[in-house]
Image (tube, helix red, strand yellow):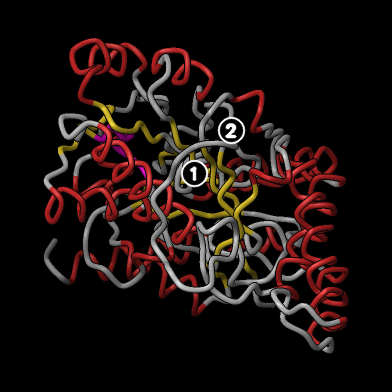
């Protein structure tokens, strides 16, 4: 049987979401139009906005719909930076966690290259969480220069949850953005309680459709937009509103939040079962930040004497889908920056893969992986040896 253990990359559409999406795509109308069709679409979008806001602990006026989590992160990073530098040209330092997703790192690097921004990384402890003492030192020494601090709520490769409220306390008024794409709908998330100035959430990580996400932005914040045109989404994200996907996003959020506690417990038990079976089948396997509280379904494993591409291809041939981490960097021949930040060597990082479990994962699938993993690793090690590594 085909076994999908890459839920952190994207999740299967929830059956209820699939029904809603099919019905919504049969409707006609642009939500910006004034006629009856347009007003009906607008009504459904605003109802979805209210629903998502309530589930995320935000106000409906703080929800800005985008086409992806990457777009939302770019809007936050670049928008905050441009607004801050416009007000004070000396405030050009951006501080981010060393293991941020590429959707955070690359916009910052673009600003460094093209806009004169400066970048400081917050180091990561061996437990897979940011070093708060290091962050405190960065802020104390550069308070008047920092435009933005960005720390993800839960890491996509390790699953570790970050102390965001402590980050906000240390920032003491400096804008803080958190990428909550991996956490929203899977673990408790409340925008207002975290105290951040903005957060990114996405539909396809919680059983919703691809192509829709949201930036939660504190009401009243002056943010420079990326897109200009129709003035949709409070002039922050011009473009025709994807009403069907937005309504489906709201349904996915409702279902995932309603089932969150039950799913967390079941998925965590499956993940622990997978960890036990891998330990038994491959005794020298090492688990990265596996004992740190975090998302229920992520297990990052180092298999010494292997190479990730071989491992993933052999797993795929065995009917098992896993990954090295971010799907955005699939096919890129480089060690995971997340694992390097964690303290692994390049060779260790290049022999590590991520299994990510989700709502549809079963014990039978975990047992199947447990029965095949020793053979897969043995074949990967043989290939690694032949290559003279």
Residue 6 picture quarter: bottom right
Q: Does the magenta stretch include residue 20?
A: no
Q: In this view, does 97 lie to the left or right of 229?
A: left
Q: Which of marks 1 and 2 is in front?
A: 1
Q: Which type of secondary structure does the marked residue at label 1 adopt?
A: strand
Look at the picture and state if 220 lies above or below 156.
above
Image point (77%, 64%), residue name: 45
- Please state which of residues 178 and 281 is positioned toward the viewer in this rendering: 178
Residue 14 picture quarter: bottom right
Instruction: State the separation of the CA atoms marked 1 and 2.
Output: 15 Å
Q: Where is residue 139 in the image (x, y as percent from the top left)?
A: 27, 16
Residue under label 1:
179
Image quadrant containing the C terminus: bottom left
Image point (54%, 31%), residue name: 161
Q: Which of the marked residues, 1 or 2, is nearer the chain's N terminus? A: 1
Q: Position of residue 266 (x, y in %)?
A: 79, 44
Q: Which type of secondary structure does the marked residue at label 2 adopt?
A: loop
Image point (42%, 66%), residue name: 227
Q: Does the magenta stretch include residue 97?
A: yes
Image quadrant containing the N terminus: bottom right
Residue under label 2:
294
Image point (69%, 57%), residue name: 206
Neighbours of disc 2 within 10 Å: few (<14), some (14-19), many (20+): many
- Please state which of residues 47 and 40 is positioned toward the viewer in this rendering: 40
Which contiguous range is marked in magenta? 94-100
Neighbours of disc 1 within 10 Å: few (<14), some (14-19), many (20+): many
- Please state which of residues 135 and 347 is positioned toward the viewer in this rendering: 135
Look at the picture and state if 33 lies above or below 286.
below
């Amino acid at each position: 049987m085909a076994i999908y253990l890459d839920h952190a990359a994207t999740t299967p559409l929830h059956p209820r979401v699939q029904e809603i999406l099919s019905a919504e795509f049969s409707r006609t109308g642009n939500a910006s139009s004034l006629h009856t069709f347009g007003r009906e679409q607008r009504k459904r979008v605003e109802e979805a906005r209210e629903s998502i806001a309530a589930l995320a602990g935000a106000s409906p006026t703080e929800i800005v719909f985008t086409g992806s989590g990457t777009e939302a992160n770019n809007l936050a990073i670049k928008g905050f930076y441009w607004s801050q530098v416009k007000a004070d040209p000396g405030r050009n330092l951006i501080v981010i966690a060393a293991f941020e997703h590429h959707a955070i790192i690359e916009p910052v690097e673009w600003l460094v290259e093209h806009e004169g921004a400066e970048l400081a990384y917050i180091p990561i402890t061996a437990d897979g969480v940011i070093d708060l003492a290091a962050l405190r030192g960065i802020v104390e020494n550069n308070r008047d220069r920092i435009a933005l601090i960005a720390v993800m709520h839960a890491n996509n490769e390790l699953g570790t949850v970050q102390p965001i409220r402590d980050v906000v306390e240390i920032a003491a008024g400096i804008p803080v953005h958190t990428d909550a794409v991996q956490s929203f709908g899977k673990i408790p998330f409340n925008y207002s309680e975290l105290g951040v100035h903005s957060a990114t959430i996405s539909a396809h990580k919680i059983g919703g459709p691809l192509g829709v996400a949201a930036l939660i932005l504190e009401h009243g914040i002056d943010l420079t937009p990326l897109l200009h045109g129709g003035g949709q989404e409070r002039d922050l994200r011009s473009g025709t509103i994807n009403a069907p996907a937005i309504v489906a996003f709201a349904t996915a959020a409702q279902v995932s939040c309603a089932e969150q506690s039950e799913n967390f417990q079941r998925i965590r038990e499956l993940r622990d079962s997978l960890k036990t079976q891998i330990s038994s089948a491959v005794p020298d396997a090492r688990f990265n930040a596996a004992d740190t509280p975090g998302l229920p379904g992520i297990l990052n494993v180092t298999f010494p004497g292997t190479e990730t591409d071989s491992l993933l291809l052999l797993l795929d041939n065995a009917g098992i889908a896993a990954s090295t981490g971010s799907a955005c960097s699939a096919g890129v021949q480089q060690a995971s920056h997340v694992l390097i930040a964690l303290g692994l060597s390049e060779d260790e990082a290049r022999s590590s893969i991520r299994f990510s479990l989700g709502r549809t994962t079963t014990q039978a699938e975990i047992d199947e992986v447990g029965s095949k993993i020793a053979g897969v690793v043995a074949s990967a090690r043989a290939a690694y040896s032949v290559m003279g590594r």
